[in-house]
Amino acid sequence: MKHSATECLLKMYDEQHELEDYQSGVPRWCTGCGDNAILTAVQRLCRDEALRPEKTVFVSGIGCSSRFPHYMKTYGFHTLHGRALPIAEGVKMVRPDLTVFVNTGDGDCCSIGAAHWIHAIRYNMNLTVFLHDNQIYGLTKKQASPTSPIGTKSNTTPRGSYLDALNPLSVTLGIANASFVAQAVDWIPESLFEIVKAAYHHKGLSFVRILQRCPEWLPKSLDPWMQDPDSIQLLHHENALKLSAGLSKVYKNQLLHDPLDMNRAREIASTDHVIPVGILYQNRDIPCYEETRQSKVLRTTETIRNGFETELDKYSV
Amino acid sequence: MKHSATECLLKMYDEQHELEDYQSGVPRWCTGCGDNAILTAVQRLCRDEALRPEKTVFVSGIGCSSRFPHYMKTYGFHTLHGRALPIAEGVKMVRPDLTVFVNTGDGDCCSIGAAHWIHAIRYNMNLTVFLHDNQIYGLTKKQASPTSPIGTKSNTTPRGSYLDALNPLSVTLGIANASFVAQAVDWIPESLFEIVKAAYHHKGLSFVRILQRCPEWLPKSLDPWMQDPDSIQLLHHENALKLSAGLSKVYKNQLLHDPLDMNRAREIASTDHVIPVGILYQNRDIPCYEETRQSKVLRTTETIRNGFETELDKYSV
Amino acid sequence: MTLEMPLKKAKQKATTTLKEHIVEIISDSGEGAQRCGQSLGAIAARMGNGIWTTEIIPAEIRPPARSVAGASGNRIRIGSSYITNGGDETDLVVAFNEQVLLGRVRDRELKPGCIILLESMWRKHPDLNTSMAYVETHDRLVAAGYKVYEIPMEQECLLIVANARQGKNMFALGMLCHIYSFDLQMAREQIALTFGKKAQSVIDSNIKLLEAGQQWAQANLDFSFHIPASPAQKPQIVINGNTAVALGIMASGMELCAMYPITPATSTSHYLSDVFEKVGGLVHQAEDEIAACAFAVGASYASKCTVTVTSGPGYSLKQEVIGLAVMAEIPLVVVNVQRGGPSTGQPTKVEQGDLMTAIFGSHGDAPKVVMAPATIEDCFYSIITARKIAEAFNMVVVVLTDASLSSSQQPFTRPQFNESWLAPPFDQSPVPEGAKPYDWDATTGLARRFIPGQPGGMHTVTGLAHDRQSHVAYDPEINHEGLRARSLKLAALQKTLSPPEVFGDAEGDLLVVGWGSTKGAIEEAVESLRAEGKNVSSIHLRFLLPMQPGIKEVLQRFKKVMTIETNWSDSPDDEIIDESNRRYSSLAILLRSRYLVDVDCWSEVKGQPVKPSTIRRVLLAKLKK
Amino acid sequence: MTLEMPLKKAKQKATTTLKEHIVEIISDSGEGAQRCGQSLGAIAARMGNGIWTTEIIPAEIRPPARSVAGASGNRIRIGSSYITNGGDETDLVVAFNEQVLLGRVRDRELKPGCIILLESMWRKHPDLNTSMAYVETHDRLVAAGYKVYEIPMEQECLLIVANARQGKNMFALGMLCHIYSFDLQMAREQIALTFGKKAQSVIDSNIKLLEAGQQWAQANLDFSFHIPASPAQKPQIVINGNTAVALGIMASGMELCAMYPITPATSTSHYLSDVFEKVGGLVHQAEDEIAACAFAVGASYASKCTVTVTSGPGYSLKQEVIGLAVMAEIPLVVVNVQRGGPSTGQPTKVEQGDLMTAIFGSHGDAPKVVMAPATIEDCFYSIITARKIAEAFNMVVVVLTDASLSSSQQPFTRPQFNESWLAPPFDQSPVPEGAKPYDWDATTGLARRFIPGQPGGMHTVTGLAHDRQSHVAYDPEINHEGLRARSLKLAALQKTLSPPEVFGDAEGDLLVVGWGSTKGAIEEAVESLRAEGKNVSSIHLRFLLPMQPGIKEVLQRFKKVMTIETNWSDSPDDEIIDESNRRYSSLAILLRSRYLVDVDCWSEVKGQPVKPSTIRRVLLAKLKK
Ligand SMILES: Cc1ncc(C[n+]2csc(CCOP(=O)(O)OP(=O)(O)O)c2C)c(N)n1
Ligand SMILES: Cc1ncc(C[n+]2csc(CCOP(=O)(O)OP(=O)(O)O)c2C)c(N)n1
Ligand code: SF4
Ligand code: SF4
Ligand SMILES: [Mg+2]
Ligand SMILES: [Mg+2]
């Protein structure tokens, strides 16, 4: 393992290199786009976990964030706006041997894809889902998204958006079978990586909402949060994430939270004066749909033939 | 008012009569179907509130429950599977003067219509929404629905359904701008009516989940709850519903709950050993989308002409 | 006629020999007329008769008892030779009450003067309204010239079972076995099979009722029929189209069916949900049709071809995802069991209204294969073919059946399982250095796809325009190249198809072109006209896209060509309709456009299968014109 | 050529008179080439020149600076007479760096030997790679025969403003005003208008830059052009197609537009979101396209006709709801700004790929009206017509524009507001005793609808088959009656349409048939061939469903007929393509089917508007065949 790890580490590098030159050097995101930070964290994860590129699939919808798979030298499926989750479910269902990640945007997941989001949580398949939440429609050039704070000026809301932002965390925590719900911010690389890592290691659907900067359309919107470390509330617990010395020094606002406490998790999700960062809820005992649905029969030509003949017998005259 | 009330009461009767003969006497639901009880409660509401039939619209999706509008002698729109809410929103947006009700099933609302459900809650338009939750797909003849208890034997889950039931209440309570969330059961007419009435009087989207019996496909499933009055937990509060002597006598399991307490509401919604009946959450201060979007300009030929000319001036060469 | 009448007549008996007869059994739903009918069909099939059974289902789930719109049951067309469709009106009907019978009369489903075996219990019913309604209806029917026999079914059954409501259907089955001179042993075997899972006691009492019915009929009825049988050489099975589709899925080696419930497609997934897991397959009920299609596409992308089953409204919703599968060249089989449209339309009724949507439904140029089985046997084999084409060409294959095929039963030769039907295991071998995920063949447009797990094949599939590396590309030439490749595959497939067979002479006065479930009725009409020396022939298209080669040549050999379809076309007789605005039926549009032949069309969209006699009339009129 | 060259030459000047010229300004995005180009177009229009401006947009939101794929800007075709399309390649280009220029060369957008005005700052750039890249490119361009003028724009601007990046575009505008001999006063007015909202200081400094550019060019360039203008008599406006659609919505009296963002349709709703409320209108951004369409249908049902705006993928998603509107006969206008397909395809590129989906996209028989504006002016008036038809016939009217119309600008006569454009207030009067909600006229299929609020009109609208009372009905005849009524309305509308006008002679060797945004290019090609005595004419269809009367008569007067479209058709030259499998372009399929005329087609689907010169070549070849 150790061996293959370093091997893969090296591999990742060439691949990283390859990736770069076939993707004309740089991911096609604006400079300062939070997606770059997410990409870095995920690429580091792949390297550290020595994921085999051919056994890894990134599935995305449509949006700036959904270009993610193109920047990974793994298998990828850049699908349709809002449909990343059901397609990823199909992949995982027939190929439990694959590691499947999902990249989706706040419009992709919470607007057009909302029905699939709810049901994906309920299926609880072993998928690692990153919600790149920049609180705006990026690719289509600045329209309000469900997570845009009320008053957001956009091309479809020139005088400010009309509705309170949808809270992806509190919605997710209201859905049956939610098994891993976390929040991260793109501008704290260390915690971002730790959360991404914990999500990857969770067996079941891990839902990670990542607050992501969109300097192109909302240049200043997250500044208040970035400038005031105390507006970030780090969640920690022995059964969840432990805080490094480094992080603790910068982020003094810390909260001990047991990830099994759903009521508290919902309260925390609903606080609006701070951004909770960490694992809000984790329950390792919820079964995965692909396992409860795994057929017990070994699929051979013979089983098919026999099953088929048995059925025909029923209808013989 | 008094006068027109009785007038309308009489009207309702002939209409009821008319209704009957053009609908060949009886609603086309199975005998013992919980939808009949809901129909009774709603018809009583219309009569008591003296709703003008031509100013009242029932919008539904597709399903047994969505046949509801055909049994009301008002305006009605029996739309598409899952789309009742966005269509009702369109109606209300351009016609705030109309009273708009929505009838939707557990498949209609929580499965195919889930995205619209989430966003309807967030828009918080002044609609009264009845979720006829019989925990099964009725019209299509018995397939598991998102609210079917795990293990439910149905035509698509002959060996029992695989997933925990989705809880429409906890999901709704996780959505921004939820302003009225209640639960009723079809077999307690008095409380059903009181809740329907409170929902009607709430300004904003009132979401009422009604546990509804489907004797045809799930004949016994709700019996345990019906046979044990203590399994029903009546919510009451001075700012919500007060309990009648009659009800209190039968249903001893009562809970004082302040409908403004969201955290408690979510906890109550998530209890599974009892069925909470009553108003879980109500917030009268959340604005309605149709009002925040109402244009301040009076729409006359002149305003249009002037606005149009002003725009053309910008592009003149 | 009075209750005693049949008893009197019972003395002088006569057994009439017939070429065919149409019989139906109707009751309130829940009284078992359905099962009685299916069993009768199966017994007839065992006897070696040709049969076609058609379900009679009320629009409501549980209509009130004794209601005109509540008829539930089965109609069986029994013939001495092979039967290809439901035929015309009914010759003999068994009714458990007079109201459901009225419904059938109103729908003009009964042949004038047809034989009616009517449960007589209502005449003496305590509730006056009921008994009066019965008497009135009875007398009206008699007056209308129907041969009404009043049968004390209830009374007779009560001699055997406590609850006659449960057993009446078997008593009726017994009567019918006598009437059609069926071997009672066959009936016993059939009952044993149907109630297989039940306790022996159940089987026994049902057999008792069967025998009672047969004896009663023998003793009391003054008529019986014999329809000579011509037993098939090969072993036969009797199933409906939805079961055939489900078995086809099983036999094609597909492993996953993703669906969302919708009438009339659901029974396929009901059946599959029951049996698929036994062969390691899986049925996934998704949150909606879009998710079902997406789930299937995801699964196909990562393994072998999968299938999604739906009907009209669901098909419309799947359009965008289908377009993705086309663009990404992911194999997928989509079954659309057509129902009455547009919109929610007539969920339980038959129509061929989705052909154009199947071909043109998704935005942009989204070439896909469209097939339409014409018989129930076809439903089975089409799925196997569809899977093969989908995988060989990395294409979406749409299979259009309809509400008639889905619920009708017909015997056909028991399929001999063939390993070659199964999909080969998906490729996990390393990808050769430098191979490209979309290395389109210059001539055929075909490319081999890489499946996750294949070392060296890593790439990102996308619905955006892409080059051979699957990189997003906005280059004009690359866009053209991709469109060309995806389109060429249709031509490549077309080259492998053989020309359609002509039913009748290869040339003549009139050629009828059809597709889908109308085949039996069309050919029956054509045959009867040919028997009278009319120069009519027909062809039936199983591929709508691409169209088989050689069709133009066939069309040109006939003076007139017309399609018979059950999708809308304007009537040229309508006041404001002329050639410049008439809307033609779907297949007619396609044929006219491709072959520039003046193809006329006649269509009927009434939610019922078109009757052979109706087609006959239409063709005669066309010949005269 | 070296940096000094132009200065030398500057002595002997020459002003060449031209019929037309194509000029483009390109830069990294954010450097203002877009605005420079739009202003130049507006100024030219003010001068009375015909213009057509085309946006040049990179695929990425913010491509890296100086990248080949990053060209952002505008191309303006300037002519002495009316200009109907973007024309062929570019004659003169102003580039802010050499890399974006390379992109244009790669895309074959520059005419051989065209004039290039290139920012020269890169030559002396501190970063060696940059300066070397510049020199290398410069030399290659010169070697390739382009007339390259190196211009110290940065340097010159810095004399006026601190940040040249902000002002360069106005300097360039000034140069171009000199080159095309435009009246600087016009330019000043235009700048005042464009920066209207900004502070005076901003306007002043921009005007300074403008003047500086003009003076520099005058002093240093050895050439200039004059394109004689023929000022229009009536006042003109210059807008793009999406703005025209938005203004059409405003002027049609529709009150609600429900949408979900999608390229290239969004700018319509962006603009509407800004201005619609000022006239009491509303733009609703829904959670997805299905909801947007449903919201619009709900609003139409309860008041007046509303509109939903989308593009391909969104159009596919709306199919089911559109079918409901058709079935329930609720007026609705659906605008589909076509983009490259299938699937996500080429979001920013032009294509005419959705015609068949517009007609056949929803399952069952869902007759709707399909219109296609051919010019930008058309975009405006089509919406007004669409609203009227939708309301008069209670139908869905689909308006197909495309990514070329949506972003191109063209001057046309300023519309004179007309009250009759507006929808009348919706009916709230009591419904007469016994009137029915679907009282279909026997001849035309038309029925008056009842709107909530009308006393006595209470009924439940449904997507299920229904009778005149709007009661759900499964009766065969009623289903037929409803289908007939909905279909007849198309014929009724068709009777009100007039035959298409022929461009060119009414008979000849070749007729070209087109639809949508290709009109200008087709007619330009036809005209140029006619000028050479070729017997070519063309017609352009604005209604695709129903089709105007009299078309067959026109087609028959020509020896050959072909369509020119930007949607896929197989090339007959491809090895495996023959008449039995060739897939024709959309309009060709429709024409062949309806008129049985052998209509050939030529199509190019490369994400770019078809050039007149290309069409010219195609027609010449067809004439020869
Ligand atoms: C069916 C469909 N509707 C709309 C679009 C246009 N579209 C592309 S991305 C997008 C939303 C992007 O926002 P988000 O999901 O938040 O991703 P981001 O770009 O912000 O990362 C939209 C509306 C589409 N491609 N397909
Ligand atoms: C697009 C579409 N998909 C599927 C259907 C079939 N269908 C009709 S009702 C229904 C679900 C009914 O269940 P529910 O919503 O719970 O209503 P109920 O009948 O139980 O009252 C389904 C799947 C349809 N009519 N349209
Ligand atoms: S637009 Fe926003 S989200 Fe998109 S790449 Fe640029 S910064 Fe990132
Ligand atoms: S099937 Fe169930 S839900 Fe439908 S009408 Fe019958 S009892 Fe009611
Ligand atoms: Mg976003
Ligand atoms: Mg239900």
Image: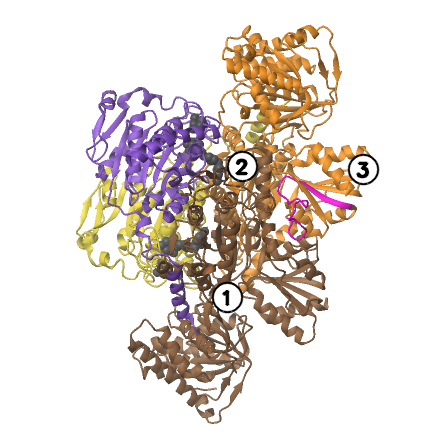
Chain colours: A purple, B yellow, C brown, D orange
- Estimate the spatial distance between the alpha carbons at disc 1 and disc 2, rounded to whole Å: 42 Å
Furthest residue to the bottom? C11
- Estimate the spatial distance between the alpha carbons at disc 1 and disc 3, rounded to whole Å: 58 Å
Q: Nearer the viewer, mark 1 or mark 2?
A: 2
Q: Nearer the viewer, mark 3 or mark 2?
A: 2
Q: For mark 2, what is the residue?
A: C467
Residue C111, given in percent of the width and then of the height, sits at 55, 76
Residues D360 and C60: in front is D360
Helix, strand or loop at disc 1? helix
**Circle 2 chain:** C
Share a chain, discs 1 and 3?
no
Helix, strand or loop at disc 2? loop
Q: Amino acid at mark 3?
A: Lys
Q: Is residue B252 above or below residue B313?
A: below
Residue B299, given in percent of the width and then of the height, sits at 52, 33
Q: For mark 1, what is the residue?
A: C377
Along the horizontal axis of the image, is A237 left or right of C384?
left
Along the horizontal axis of the image, is D6 left or right of C166?
right
Residue found 51% across the figure and 71% down from its top: C106
Which quadrant would residue C210 be assigned to in this image? bottom left
Q: Nearer the viewer, mark 1 or mark 3?
A: 1
Furthest residue to the right? D533
Along the horizontal axis of the image, is A220 left or right of D560?
left
- Would you say residue D561 sits in the magenta stretch? yes
Residue D490, given in percent of the width and then of the height, sits at 63, 50
Q: For mark 3, what is the residue?
A: D534
